[in-house]
């Protein structure tokens, strides 16, 4: 008699989250390169997180947005700027998220301070949102009250009229500041734990050749998006959309067999190999044909017999990029050179340690509108030995309708790909509000990273 106490998984009822795209995995493809890679690159970490729909009101509800502004953003570590925004004493940059505004200053050669960007007289911002420059003192533009860079009250015009203002009560309220990987993080909560808790595996993974403190910003583009910040970043958390959104990439992008990892509540990753065709792409191709279709095709480059297109492409980039930047790239494997290796740090930051795809993303709300977001897209480059860190370029800002290809310095091919990504977003946001369905239905594996963000967000909102 069958024992019905146990459920035996069958093909009809697979264990949720265990199914994978048939064929070689990302790990198989990277191992097939036959190169030494950092252990982190092929580490795997996934567990099933549930399959309930994610409610659409989380994206468009003003109440939900207000709750995030109260319980998430003032409590979480978030990346505010890079150290190259604050090279000299007196350099400042402002960082806004929703109604919150912070001013970061280099107060001493070895010290960065962050203050609430609001004058203690009558509230005026010391410097406008999204601005940067030099401020030897923090002087309010309205009536001229000023503070020194260490936050002490320095001058009150007509001080005789303010006998009730005591210096010790009028120090600028600080936010916590920590630096990791050349990124300056802030936390507005005076009781916040250390940044390291939120970074989890990142310091271990981003060491040696992936140490982003040895890189600098060479291009920074911002784009305004007509959607919620979470929906915007979710468009970049999976390669599932490559099939329909980036059809031109199918011959050269192994999308459906990408690797997805959930390393902790705050860090996830995908690795998406470039130079292998999509499992959806059934047309036979030679390695030469693959090479000719790579995003940055190189005229005259040929694939010798027995070699992979990605290997030839990686070697070409090692040489040409290495020479152009004055950096020895010979230690990077083919995968680190060409693949899309994308980490996400909760709540809103993406880091790519690769060399030809060296991006940093950030998605945050604009003002108090749940349906507007700002997407920061930065490209980093390795610093050559002895090279002085260049000052950060000012961001080039695009409106929702403008193409990435119009941004000076942006590659046309990659600009087109980002346009494809962001063109979906306003339609999705409108559809979410029109839908009779309660929420979005996510894939168990390929879209698990988006679910993890919501689970961690809920912990903040319920705290
Ligand atoms: S509001 Fe700042 S000096 Fe008056
Ligand atoms: Fe995309």
Image (spheres, grey):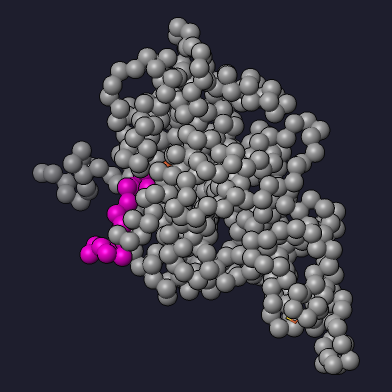
Q: Position of residue 137 (x, y in %)?
A: 83, 67
Q: At 87% from the left edge and 87% from the top edge, which residue is drawn?
A: 158
Q: Depth check: 12 or 400 in front?
A: 400
At a point 17% along the width and 46% down the height, the residue shown is 3
Q: Going by the picture, which residue comes out furthest to the left?
A: 1
At a point 74% along the width and 78% down the height, the residue shown is: 142
- Residue 65 or 449: which is nearer the viewer? 65
Q: Is residue 20 left or right of residue 449?
A: left
**Can residue 316 be seen here?**
yes
As for residue 143 lying within the magenta part, the answer is no
Say whether residue 445 is magenta: yes
Q: Report which quarter residue 287 is drawn in.
A: top left
Q: Is residue 265 above or below residue 169?
A: above
Residue 294 % position (x, y): 45, 25
Position of 125 relative to 48 (above/below): below
Q: Is residue 269 above or below residue 317?
A: below
Residue 182 as seen in the image, left or right of residue 364: right
Which span is picked out in magenta? 432-453
Instruction: Single out the residue that lies furthest toward the top.
Output: 305
Q: Quadrant of residue 441?
A: bottom left
Residue 53 seen: no
Q: Report ligand 2 position as a quadrant.
A: top left
């Amino acid at each position: 008699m069958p024992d019905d106490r146990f459920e035996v998984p069958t093909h009809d009822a697979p264990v949720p989250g265990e199914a994978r795209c048939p064929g070689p995995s990302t790990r198989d493809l990277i191992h097939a390169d036959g190169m030494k890679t950092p252990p982190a690159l092929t580490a795997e970490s996934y567990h099933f997180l549930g399959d309930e729909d994610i409610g659409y009101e989380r994206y468009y509800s003003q109440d939900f947005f207000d709750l995030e502004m109260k319980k998430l953003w003032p409590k979480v570590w978030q990346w505010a700027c890079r150290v190259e925004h604050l090279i000299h004493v007196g350099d400042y940059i402002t960082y806004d998220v929703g109604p919150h505004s912070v001013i970061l200053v280099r107060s001493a050669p070895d010290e960065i301070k962050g203050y609430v960007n609001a004058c203690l007289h009558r509230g005026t911002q010391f410097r406008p949102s999204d601005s940067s420059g030099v401020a030897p003192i923090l002087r309010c533009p309205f009536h001229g009250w000023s503070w020194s860079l260490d936050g002490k009250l320095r001058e009150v015009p007509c001080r005789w009229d303010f006998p009730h203002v005591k210096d010790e009560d009028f120090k600028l309220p600080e936010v916590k500041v920590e630096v990791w990987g050349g990124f300056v993080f802030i936390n507005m909560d005076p009781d916040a734990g250390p940044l390291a808790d939120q970074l989890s595996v990142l310091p271990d993974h981003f060491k040696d050749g992936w140490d982003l403190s040895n890189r600098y910003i060479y291009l920074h583009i911002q784009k305004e998006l007509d959607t919620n910040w979470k929906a915007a970043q979710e468009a970049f958390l999976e390669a599932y959309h490559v099939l329909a959104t980036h059809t031109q990439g199918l011959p050269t992008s192994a999308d459906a067999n990408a690797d997805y990892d959930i390393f902790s509540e705050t860090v996830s990753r995908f690795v998406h190999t470039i130079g292998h065709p999509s499992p959806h792409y059934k047309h036979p191709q030679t390695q030469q044909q693959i090479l000719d279709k790579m995003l940055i095709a190189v005229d005259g480059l040929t694939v010798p017999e027995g070699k992979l297109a990605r290997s030839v492409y990686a070697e070409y980039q090692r040489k040409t990029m290495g020479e152009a930047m004055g950096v020895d790239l010979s230690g990077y494997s083919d995968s680190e050179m060409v693949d899309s290796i994308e980490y996400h740090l909760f709540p809103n930051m993406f880091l790519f340690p690769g060399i030809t795809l060296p991006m940093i993303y950030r998605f945050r709300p604009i003002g108090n509108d749940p349906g507007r977001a700002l997407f920061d897209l930065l490209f980093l480059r390795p610093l050559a030995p002895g090279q002085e860190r260049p000052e950060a370029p000012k961001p080039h800002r695009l409106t929702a309708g403008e193409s990435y290809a119009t941004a000076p310095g942006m590659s046309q091919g990659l600009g087109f790909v980002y346009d494809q990504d962001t063109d979906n977003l306003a339609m999705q946001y409108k559809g979410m509000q029109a839908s009779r369905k309660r929420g979005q239905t996510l894939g168990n594996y390929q879209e698990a990273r988006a679910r993890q963000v919501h689970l961690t967000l809920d912990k903040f909102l319920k705290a």
